[in-house]
Amino acid sequence: MARKTGSHSEITGPRVQAAALRLIAQHGFAAVSMRQIAAEVGVQAGALYNYTNDKQTLLFDLLRTHMEHLLDALGQLPGTGDPMTRLEAFCRFHIAYHIERPDQVFISYMELRNLSPDNFSAIEVLRSRYESHLDAILKDGQSTGQFALDEPRVTTFAVIAMLTGVNTWYREDGPLSKTDLADLYWTLVRRAVAA
Amino acid sequence: MARKTGSHSEITGPRVQAAALRLIAQHGFAAVSMRQIAAEVGVQAGALYNYTNDKQTLLFDLLRTHMEHLLDALGQLPGTGDPMTRLEAFCRFHIAYHIERPDQVFISYMELRNLSPDNFSAIEVLRSRYESHLDAILKDGQSTGQFALDEPRVTTFAVIAMLTGVNTWYREDGPLSKTDLADLYWTLVRRAVAA
DNA sequence: CTTTGCAGTGAACGGCTGTTCAGTTATCAA
DNA sequence: TTGATAACTGAACAGCCGTTCACTGCAAAG
């Protein structure tokens, strides 16, 4: 099917996508061959081209799917209301969502440079849409006087970097529960921005 | 020379190291060939093996050199004294040092998975030595009552992730000076940890 | 002027790369 | 049972990979 249409936005087969995700997260896009992915699925390399146009599209679909799901989930958070409440909701959401999808998150900012220019731009659009959600919260809190920020845009980057950082060290079987984790990070963020 | 000794810790030729750094930061370790690196230096691929044992060692030397220079520079900061003062010094140092070396920083946590197990362990040792510097500051400030932290170790990860994040967005020709930048981040960190 | 030794060449090695495609197998509707 | 169609194989393609090595050119030491 994929072979015939040549479309750029096919939905890659779930089995293929899962195998690619796992292997690319582990070894990196450039280091993983189509034959390895095929072996993980349990088919020959040629069969993959029933599900994707080429290796580049396979990576792009991985990142695009992740970003779209992320934005969908984000859309369910309230877009208006008390900035402090919304900031807390965002922080807890971000940590919870990212900690559950370490492979997707890892790939999504590790393999950006392996995207073609067009694909890169497409992902960047989605990414900045996500960031602007936090940006809006910070600016709202700024105008109500609840937050004290010299540069909301910089704070956005700082908070997101801090929150996303959990993925580099948090282990499910460690001493900290996910609730503990969210509490700790929320305390840090709240104090960092509070007036 | 390198060809004969077979040593694991040779210092790769500076020209080769610089070329490898630039290309790997841009395209990724697995995506860059020895022939590309050689072309950047202006020699044939075979000549590289006068300076390094193999491609893996070339990457390892890049990361090891970076981490050793980082630790050297860190060693010049005061190890004792007022925790708040030391924390500020650390934050400003971290930002200043990292912002000047975007390629090294990028590679140093992007290409970790391309290291052999032994080389990976060696780099991890250096990395955790760096982190423990901040950890010590936070624990000191905790005991003097200047900081209010539920989990200093988590705070260490959070602060380092936040500070290192500048490299993903800061541009030299943007509206913010490096001093502005350090001031902004220091304000966030100070308020996040202060009692 | 000769000798020594390093730096670099360029060809070659086996092996792996993404991708294509004619041909085989399996599935399922009529 | 037949026919259609989707899924998959396995071989092949041209090309690049890391690494080795006999050989050349050159610079400095005796």
Image: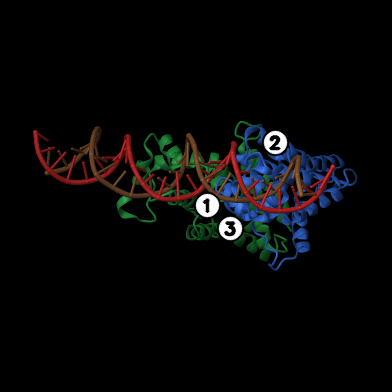
Chain colours: A green, B blue, C brown, D red
Q: Give the mark toward the camera: 1 or 2.
A: 2
| Secondary structure state at the residue bearing disc 2 | helix
How many angstroms separate mark 2 from mark 3 (CA)? 53 Å
Q: Is residue A15 above or below residue A152?
A: above
The residue indicated by pointer 3 is A131
The residue indicated by pointer 2 is B4
Q: Give the mark toward the camera: 2 or 3.
A: 2
Q: Earlier in the sequence, mark 1 or mark 3?
A: 1
| Secondary structure state at the residue bearing disc 1 | helix
Residue A93 is at least partly visible in this image: no
| Viewer-side residue, D21 vs A181 | D21
The residue indicated by pointer 1 is A114
Q: Residue placed at 39% from the left, 56% from the top?
A: A8
Kind of residue sitting beneath label 2: Lys
**Image position of B84 (left or right of B107):** right
Question: Toward which corner of the image does residue A9 lie, by quadrant?
Answer: bottom left
Question: Toward which corner of the image does residue C3 lie, by quadrant?
Answer: top right
Q: Is residue B65 above or below residue A112?
A: above
**Image position of A70 (left or right of A170):** left
Kind of residue sitting beneath label 1: Asn
Asked if the residue under mark 3 is in contact with the one under mark 1, i.e. CB atoms within 8 Å, the reply is no
| Viewer-side residue, C7 vs A110 | C7
